[in-house]
Structure formats: structure tokens, C-alpha cells
Amino acid sequence: MRELESLLTMLARPRALIEVGLVLACLALSWLIVYRIAKHVTAAPGHHSVLLGHRVYDGVLFPVIALLLALGARRLMPLLGEPVALFRVVIPVLLSLVVIRLVARVLRATMPDSVGIKLLERSVSWVAWLGSILWIVGLLPILIDELDDYKLGFLPKNARGESTTVYDLLVGVLQVGAIMLVVLWLSSAIESRLLRGKSVMDLSMRKIAVNLTRTALMVVGAMVALNMVGLNLSALSWLGGAVGVGLGFGLQKIAANYVSGFMILAERSLRIGDMVKVDNFEGRISDIKTRYTVIRALNGREAIVPNESLITTRVENLSLADPQVNVTTVVQVAYGTDVDALFPQLIEEIQRVPRVLSEPAPSVSLSNFAADGLELTIGFWISDPHNGQGGVRSDVNLAVLRLLNRLGIDIPFPQRVVRTVAETPSPAAGPTAAAATAPDATRG
């Protein structure tokens, strides 16, 4: 606690205002530098995910530049003949902020929909702030010495040939976490660059490249991390046999889904943006993962379909060879209508509907002689089935209705004629009943 008392004493001196001014100057200069950088790269997508964030100050670049400037100013203080006090607090705080921002931004960029991201971010924040507090009060070196005294005999020896301690284990965990964080950052940057662009023609091939790149980076990162910890990779050869046995039994479905995902992307039988129907669920493919495919219906519902099911079952792809879809509607007109003159007017009126294609042109055919009128089937083509068919069908029906009303053509509706038959008397009723039911001929 003497370290903390001396720090508070030095901060209470009037000459500590020089350090306050230098700290404020470092923060202002770092904000200005990041602001100028963000102003030039705003138009480039993907740059705000980790380094710059959504604003100038919430990315990783701002605390990094502030930390570098603070380290330079701290070196300058002894040259000015001033003791260092405030920078002993500022530098650990900025270092903790760099770690927290880096972890939070990388995890949000790589796994934005994960449920445990906030919990992991909160845990890293607590550990980082606790480490900075221990550093400031001078307890961190004492804690490190205590952790270095606890031996873990059940673990392999470290790189120095000594028994692994708790401190060695914590350093190894931090090294592995740092390596995997860098790997996730690289994979996120590569993914954003490969998937950049509005064209979806080669999106499946780019998705394959993204998945292969991420898998390769994760494998290389894991090997480097294990090597840094000091584990002999040749000793892990037994893991390959165990993984093979696991894939042969319990993991065969998962392996089949992964292989099916790459086959779907490579064959391009199903592409992102296609309208498909799988097991009576119709929607648009919004994403193809390595294990499953996400299909989004027009009403907002989403279905997660394993990739193996898309390979082994029947799938209707409404836009595999051609995204154009034919939509039909039916209307009846009264018997006696001049359909030869009506057909060209209907086609001309339907072509004015915004989403209806002029090529192929709409068609009208006499499909049935119905009980109440002539049944006409109207067919037209659209090129955006992912926007739904109900809206364009309604627009076509309204256009047909306006045309028929303008031409004075009736749309028939069912009519029924009810006839009342007089009841005849039964022979067993006798002449009296017959005379009672017979009409009176003498009445006028």
C-alpha cells in the first residue's frame, strides 16, 4: 500500500497539473488523428468494424494512439525534471481499454449473433480493469510471484524444463486467446473483403473461399498457439485417430452437413438469393453456412435447414436457371362478350402494372365454359419472386377490374331460380280433402 500512498501524494502536488495537461493533449491529439483517418475511409465498407468503430472514439485505433502518445509523454517527463505520477494511472487504464475494445470489436465482427458475446465481453472487461487496478496499486508483481510459486505437477513441464505453475498456465491461456483473437480478426477482414459487392452471381464461390480461409486460419492459429504454450504437436497424433473414430460414429451427421455445405456452394445448385421450397416451406435463401442453410419466408419467418437435407431430399428452386416466375389469375365474363376484342385490351392493361414483365408478354386464354360465364386465365411474368406474388396479383386483378368496368362488361355471379310446386292431395284423403284443395273456379 506504500505504492498507493506515494502515488496519491504525488498527485496532490500542484506540479501534477503539467501531467494533466499532457494527458489531455494526448487524448485530444489521438482523437484528431482518428477523426482525420475516419473522414478519409468512411466510404470504404468494413473499416469501421474493428479499428474505427461506428464513431471516432469507440474503435480500437483511438486508445492505441492515445496509449502510444502517453508512453512518449511519460518518457518526456524525466527530461523536464518532473516526477511521473498521473501517467502511472493513465497508461494501465489505456492498456486495459485497448484490450477491451479489441476483444469486443473482433467478437462482434466475427460472431454478431452469438448469445454469449456480451457475457464474454463483460468477463474480459472485469479481468482487464482488475489487472489495471492491481498494477496501479503495486500488487500485480506480488500476485505474479505468488502464482509462480504454485506448481502443477500433473501438467507437462514448461519450456524451461521446470514444473508448470499457475502463472505459466495463465500466460499460456492469454497467449492462446491472443492468437485466436488475431486469427478471428484476420478472417473477419478477409470475409468482408471477399463478400464485398452487390452482385450475387459469384457469391457462392466467394462463400466457399471465406469458409476455407477461416478454417485454414483457425487450424494454423491453433497450431501456433499450442506451440507457443510449449506442447509438442507430435504428441497430439493420437487426436487424429480419436477424431476419426468420432466422425465415424457420433459426428457423422455433423460431418455430413459440413461436406454437404461445401458441395452446395461448389455445385451452385442452391445460391444465396434463390427462391426455394423445402418440405412445404417456401422462402428466399438468406445465407449458406458450413453446417446449415437459412431460408427466410416472405412473412419474416426463418427456417434453419441442415445442409444434408438439401442434398438428399427434393428441393424446388424457383430461380435456378431463370429468376423469372409465371403468375396466373382467373376472371369470368358474361356469355356473349366479344373475347376476341377483349384479349388485346387485357394484355395492354396488364403490361402497365409496374412489376409485370413485357417480355415474355402476358397471355390471356379462354380456359373453361363455366356455369355462370366464360372463364379467362391470365398469365404474366415477374423477375422478383422474393418480393412476393400476392401484391402483384392484386395489382393485376385491380387493373382487370377497372378495364371491365370501363368497357361495361359484367363479371357474372351465381344466380339460382326457385320454383314452388303446388302439393297434390293423397288418394287416401278422400273426396272431401280433394274438394278442399281444389281451386275455386267460381271466384274471379
Image (cartoon, helix red, strand yellow):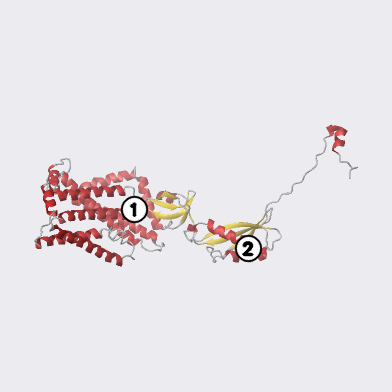
Locate residue 365 relative to residue 117 in the image: left or right.
right
Can you give x and y, in whole percent of width and height, for residue 269 in the image? 43, 57
Reply above or below: 430 against 441.
above
Q: Amino acid at mark 1?
A: Pro
Residue wearing tag 2: 403
The 10 Å Cα crowd at callout 1, few under 14, some 14 to 19, many 20 or more, is few
Which residue is at the front of the view, 214 or 372?
372
Residue at the (12%, 62%) spot, across then down: 76
Q: Residue 31: where, in percent of width, then height?
A: 25, 62
Q: Which mark, by number, is residue 237? A: none
Residue in the picture at 55% in, 63% down: 353
Residue projecting furthest to the left: 81
Does any portion of residue 223 appear in the rendered image?
A: no
Q: Earlier in the sequence, mark 2 or mark 1?
A: 1
Q: Quadrant of the C terminus?
A: top right
When asked about the image quadrant of residue 352, the answer is bottom right
Q: Which residue is mark 1?
A: 112
Q: Label 2 crowding class (10 Å Cα cut-off): few <14, some 14-19, many 20+?
A: some
Q: Residue furthest bottom?
A: 40
| Distance of label 2 from label 1 (alpha carbons) | 52 Å
Q: Viewed as shown, does residue 161 lie left or right of 114?
A: left
Q: Position of residue 421 (x, y in %)?
A: 79, 43
Q: Taking the image as drawn, is residue 149 in sight?
A: yes
Q: Which secondary structure, mark 2?
A: helix
Amino acid type indicated by mark 2: Leu
Mark 1, secondary structure of its residue: loop
Looking at this view, is 246 or 197 the one in front?
197
Most foreground residue, 52 or 159: 52
